[in-house]
Amino acid sequence: MPGINLFVPTFRVKECLAEIEKCLEIGWTGLGFKTVEFEEQWKAYTGLPHVHFLNSATAGLHLAVKIMKDHFKWSDGDEIISTPITFVSTNHAILYEGMKVVFADVDEHLCLDPESIEARITPRTRAVMFVGMGGNVGQYERVTEICKSHGLKLIVDAAHLAGTRYRGQTPGRDADAVVYSYQAVKNLPTGDSGAIYFADPELDRIVRQQSWLGIDKDTYSRTHSQDSYKWYYEVPYLGYKYHGNSIMAAIALVQLRYLDQDNAYRRQIAKWYDEIFTGHDEIGLIPVVEACESSRHLYQVAIDNRDEAILALNNMDIFPGVHYRDNTEYEHYRYAHGTCPRAHRMSNRILSLPCHLRLTHADVIKVGESVIATVKRTSGVEKAFGGRPSPADATRMRIVQG
C-alpha cells in the first residue's frame, strides 16, 4: 500500500494518449501548441490573469526569485524569509541567486507563522516565500497583510495547492508570484512540469523570455508568423531552458478535467482518517483552516516515535512518507539550525499517510487502525527501553512486531 499519489485510470490513459497523438500528428512536441492551450485553460480554472507553463516548479521558483531580484534591484546577501518545512527546491531557489534564506517557524498548520515572520524582518528583507503545505493555506491572509505593511514581495510555492480554494477562490491571486507543480506525484500529475504566475504583466513578459534562453520570440510563434523576418530574433536576457513542452501539457490538459473530482476523493479519504483517529489523543491531526477547501495533497499526522512507527508500518506493507525533514539540518542551511523549534520538533513527528486515488474505504480503515496500534506499541517499547530506542533497539522492535 504505497503512499504515492499518481494514479491514471485506463480511460484517462487513453485520453492522454489521444492528446499526445495530436502533437505527434502535427509534429509539434515542444514549446507552444498544447502549452498555450493549457495556459489558457489554467487561467480560466484559477482566475489568474497570467500563467506560463514550465518544465518544473523548481524552475518556476528560481525564475520568480531571479526576475524579481533583477527587476527590483535586489543585491546578493539580501534576505527572503522562508520555511524549514518544505522540499529543498523552495529554498535552493533563493540560494541560486546569491540571496540569504532567513527561516521563520511554522504554525499548527505547518505553514509559516506570521508572528515568526515579523520577528525575522530586517532592513535587508525583500520577500516572503510562503508554502501551502499539503494543500492548506495556513494563515495566508495574515502573511499577505504583513508583506503589504512592510513593502515585501510575496512568492507562493503552490506545489501542493492545485485545486485548493480559500473562501471560494484560488489562493495567491493577491501574491506577486505563484508557482505550481505538475510533477508525477502531485494532484495534477504529468511526467514533470510546472507553471508560474506573475501579477505584474511586465514580469510575465520577461519570464516567457527568460525561460526560453532569453530569446524574445519563441519558436512556435515565429513558425506561425507571416512576417518575412520571422527567423530573426534578439536575445535580451541570459536566460534558461526552463520552458515546458507540449507532451507534458497534453497530459496536463487531461488531468485538469479531473482535478476537482480527484481532490474531492482525497478530501473524502481525509475525512475517513479523521473519523478513525477521533478520540486518539496520541495521534495529532494537522488542522485545515476553516473556509479552506484543501487539495489534500497530503494527509499528515504527528506522532511520537515516528521513525520506529515507520519501520513497523513498513512490515505491514504500509509505506507512509515524511514531508519534510527540517531544512536547517542540511549542510546548506545549517547556519539556522535551532532557530525554528516548532518546525524542528514537528519534522521529527510528522508522518504522511497514503492519500492516493487507489485507496478504498477498507484500505483507509486498515491504515488508520494499523497506525493506532503501532503508535501504542512503539510508545510501550519506548517505556521499556527507558526512552527513545537506539537504532539497535529499534531493529529488535521491528523483528518482534514483524
Image: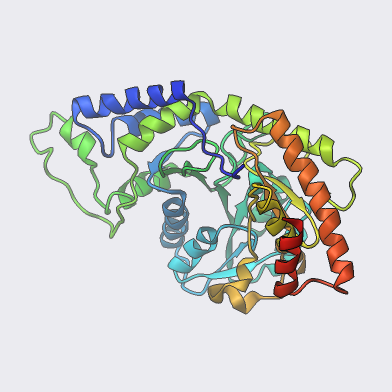
Residue 9's x, y, as percent?
Answer: 49, 26
The residue lying at 69 percent from left, 65 percent from top is 104
Instruction: Name the quadrant containing residue 80.
Output: bottom right
Residue 237 versus residue 122 in the image, above or below: above
**Residue sitting nearer the eye, 72 or 156:** 156
Instruction: Name the quadrant containing residue 263.
Output: top right
Please name the colour scheme applied to the rendered image.
rainbow
Please indicate whether residue 230 sits to the left or right of residue 309 in the image. left
Please indicate whether residue 84 sits to the left or right of residue 386 in the image. left
Q: Residue furthest bottom?
A: 335
**Residue sitting nearer the eye, 242 or 252:** 252
Residue 28 versus residue 209 in the image, above or below: above
Could you tell me which quadrant the C terminus lies in?
A: bottom right
Residue 238 versus residue 290 in the image, above or below: below
Could you tell me which quadrant the N terminus lies in?
A: top right
Residue 257's x, y, as percent?
Answer: 49, 23
The residue lying at 79 percent from left, 37 percent from top is 290
Residue 203's x, y, as percent?
Answer: 42, 48
Instruction: Name the quadrant containing residue 362.
Output: top right
Please indicate whether residue 310 sits to the left or right of residue 182 in the image. right
Q: Is residue 346 visible?
A: no
Q: Is residue 344 visible?
A: yes
The count of marks equals 0
